[in-house]
């Protein structure tokens, strides 16, 4: 199987588990984002930062991880070709 086919297959297989894990974490911090009462400002600021970080990381992992796998596999094949 080529590196491209491997990356596409792995991305399809891992999409649901990565997305479910990220959404679970994001939904878990939502009560902090809508908190009120004493010290709500600190809780709100932290949760919004965490929400943005996890959301951005999810997008980057789902889109760039297969791309980086293909790039690394091509670099390794070039190194093997030079050694042979």
Image (cartoon, rainbow, N blue to C red):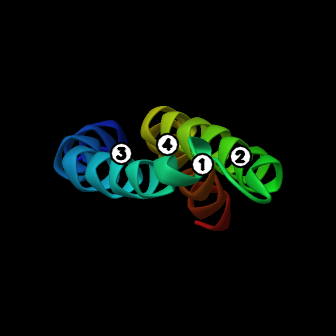
Q: Tell me the distance, in whole angstroms, between the alpha carbons under discs 2 and 3.
A: 43 Å
Identify the image quadrant of the C terminus: bottom right
Coordinates of residue 4 in the picture (x, y in percent): 34, 37
Q: Are the residues at dot 1 and dot 2 in contact (C-beta closer than 8 Å)?
A: yes
Q: Point out the tag, 1 or 2, that comes first from the N-terminus.
A: 1
Q: Camera-side residue: 67 or 59?
A: 59
Q: Which of marks 4 and 1 is in front?
A: 1
Q: Camera-side residue: 77 or 8?
A: 8
Q: Nearer the viewer, mark 2 or mark 3?
A: 2
Q: Nearer the viewer, mark 4 or mark 2?
A: 2
Q: Which of marks 1 and 3 is in front?
A: 1
Which residue is labeled 4 in the image? Answer: 58
Q: Give the answer, above or below, for where 7 lies relative to 81.
A: above
Q: Point out the tag, 4 or 2, that comes first from the N-terminus.
A: 2
Q: Tell me the distance, in whole angstroms, between the alpha carbons under discs 4 and 1.
A: 24 Å
Coordinates of residue 7 in the picture (x, y in percent): 33, 44
Q: Is mark 1 on a helix, strand or loop?
A: loop
Q: Point out the tag, 4 or 1, that comes first from the N-terminus.
A: 1
Neighbour class for label 3 at 10 Å: few (<14), some, many (≥20)? Answer: some
- Image mark for residue 44: 2
Which residue is labeled 1 in the image? Answer: 35
Q: Tell me the distance, in whole angstroms, between the alpha carbons under discs 1 and 3.
A: 46 Å
Q: What element carries label 4?
A: helix
- Image mark for residue 19: none
Q: Are the residues at dot 4 and dot 3 in contact (C-beta closer than 8 Å)?
A: no
Q: Are the residues at dot 4 and dot 1 in contact (C-beta closer than 8 Å)?
A: no
The residue depicted at 17 percent of the width and 50 percent of the height is 13
């Amino acid at each position: 199987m080529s590196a491209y086919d491997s990356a596409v297959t792995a991305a399809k297989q891992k999409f649901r588990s990565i997305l479910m894990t990220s959404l679970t974490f994001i939904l878990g911090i939502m009560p902090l984002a809508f908190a009120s009462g004493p010290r709500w400002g600190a809780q709100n600021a932290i949760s919004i930062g965490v929400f943005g970080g996890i959301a951005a990381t999810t997008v980057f992992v789902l889109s760039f991880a297969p791309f980086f796998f293909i790039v690394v596999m091509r670099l390794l094949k070039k190194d093997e070709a030079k050694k042979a």
